[in-house]
Image (cartoon, rainbow, N blue to C red):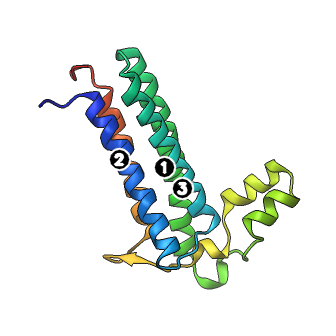
Amino acid sequence: MSLTPRWIYAFIAASCCCLLGYALYTQYFDGLHPCPLCITQRAFFVLTALVALISLIANPHQKGRYVATGLMLVTTIAGGSVAYRQVWLQSLPPDQVPACGPSLEYMFSNLPFGEAFSTLMLGDGNCAEIVWTLFGLSMPNWSMFAFIGLGLAAIVSALPMLKR
């Protein structure tokens, strides 16, 4: 068995599904309610998984692999940036944390889409709260590392030396 782009796409899609599954587990069984930035990170994991799944099914030639890698890099960099923003918010002293904003439902039902989206991306006091850690790192830290790993895997999938 040799390493092929399809195996890497399968790994990326499966990893995203596992990460999303754990996020849903912590939400529904551990009672950890996701903040706006957490939900945004989940959306980027979904987008990354979709690109990987489409690439797995399509099995593109080299130029198509470059396109797939580019799309996955866009989603992983965007998701990693959101995770980094949340890590930064969590590192702020309590007196510098922004005030908690309205709920997602309220924002998207009462604000124009552009304003709701920008408010969502900025995060608020809810996003600065650390409610879960593993080895001293919060969930956004782990999410950021996952996005970096997924981006690196996407780059490897585009290497010309891999056989289709």
> Can residue 112 be seen by looking at this rendering?
yes
- Residue 30 in percent (x, y) is at 47, 79
Describe the element under mark 1 as helix, strand or loop.
helix
Disc marking residue 45: 1
Left or right position of 149 against 76 = left
Residue at 39%, 63% (x, y): give it: 142
Which quadrant would the C terminus be assigned to in this image? top left
Which residue has dot 2 on it? 14
Residue count near mark 3 (Cα–Cα under 10 Å), binned few <14, some 14–19, many ≥20 = many
Residue at 39%, 27% (x, y): give it: 57
When asked about the image quadrant of residue 161, the answer is top left
- Residue 122 in percent (x, y) is at 68, 60
- Tag in front: 2 or 3: 2
Q: Earlier in the sequence, mark 1 or mark 2?
A: 2
Which residue has dot 3 on it? 41
Mark 2: amino acid: Ala
Q: CA distance from mark 1 to mark 2?
A: 11 Å
Mark 1: amino acid: Phe
Q: Of residues 38 and 125, which is closer to you in this image?
A: 38
Q: Are marks 1 and 2 in contact (CB under 8 Å)?
A: no
Mark 3: amino acid: Gln
Describe the element under mark 3 as helix, strand or loop.
helix
